[in-house]
């Protein structure tokens, strides 16, 4: 049984660089989507208090209730104060990764 665990870890370790590259690509996609689709109402980068309608993405990321699942559900649900922006599953995944990357550790 231990041998199976070690083998699995070694296989996953070999995939780690591939996963990191994929995550970096999704992060950049999310940043681009945020700039193109969200920056009219949200401060998507940096800090400060925007004179916009929506909260800054860094503030959203800092909320204890903000998780990847919460962001994805929110983006798939119509909201009265938000325009009806239609994003693909891949775009929603990328945007969630980007928003969570703004969380201060």
Image (cartoon, rainbow, N blue to C red):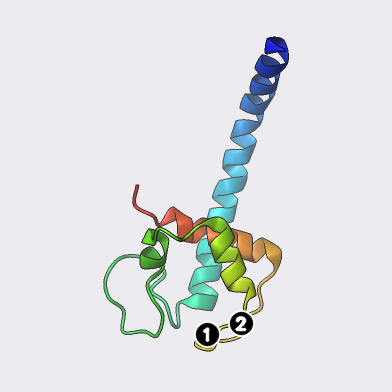
Give the quarter of the figure containing the N terminus. Answer: top right
Where residue 55 appears, x then y in whole percent?
A: 38, 75
**Disc 2 marks which residue?**
78
In front: label 2 or label 1 = 2
Q: Is residue 79 above or below residue 30?
A: below
Task: Locate residue 47 relative to residue 29 in the image: left or right.
Answer: left
SS for tag 1?
A: loop
Q: Is residue 50 above or below residue 7?
A: below
The count of marks equals 2
Dot 2: few (<14), some (14–19), or many (≥20) neighbours within 10 Å? Answer: few
Where residue 34 appears, x then y in whole percent?
A: 51, 70
Q: Is residue 29 visible?
A: no
Dot 1: few (<14), some (14–19), or many (≥20) neighbours within 10 Å? Answer: few
SS for tag 2?
A: loop
**Disc 1 marks which residue?**
82
Q: Is residue 44 visible?
A: yes
Q: How far, Cα to Cα, is label 2 from label 1? A: 8 Å
Query: Which quadrant holds residue 7?
Result: top right
Residues 1 and 22: in front is 1
Asked if the residues shown at circle 2 and circle 1 are in contact, with their CB atoms under 8 angstroms apart, the answer is yes
Residue under the image location 41 percent in, 66 percent down? 60
Residue under the image location 64 percent in, 22 percent down? 9
Query: Which quadrant holds residue 45?
Result: bottom left
Residue under the image location 59 percent in, 42 percent down? 21
Q: Is residue 12 above or below residue 29?
A: above
Where residue 96 appears, x then y in whole percent?
A: 54, 60
Task: Locate residue 39 relative to residue 78 in the image: left or right.
Answer: left
Query: Which quadrant holds residue 76?
Result: bottom right
Residue lying at the far left of the rendered structure: 48
């Amino acid at each position: 049984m231990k041998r199976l665990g070690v083998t699995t870890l070694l296989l996953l370790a070999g995939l780690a660089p591939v996963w990191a590259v994929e995550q970096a690509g999704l992060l950049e996609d999310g940043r681009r989507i945020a700039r193109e689709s969200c920056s009219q109402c949200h401060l998507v980068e940096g800090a400060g208090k925007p004179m916009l309608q929506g909260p800054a993405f860094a503030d959203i990321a800092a909320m204890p209730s903000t998780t990847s699942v919460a962001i994805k559900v929110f983006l798939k649900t119509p909201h009265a104060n938000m325009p009806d922006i239609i994003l693909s599953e891949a775009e929603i995944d990328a945007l969630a990764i980007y928003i969570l990357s703004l969380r201060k550790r």
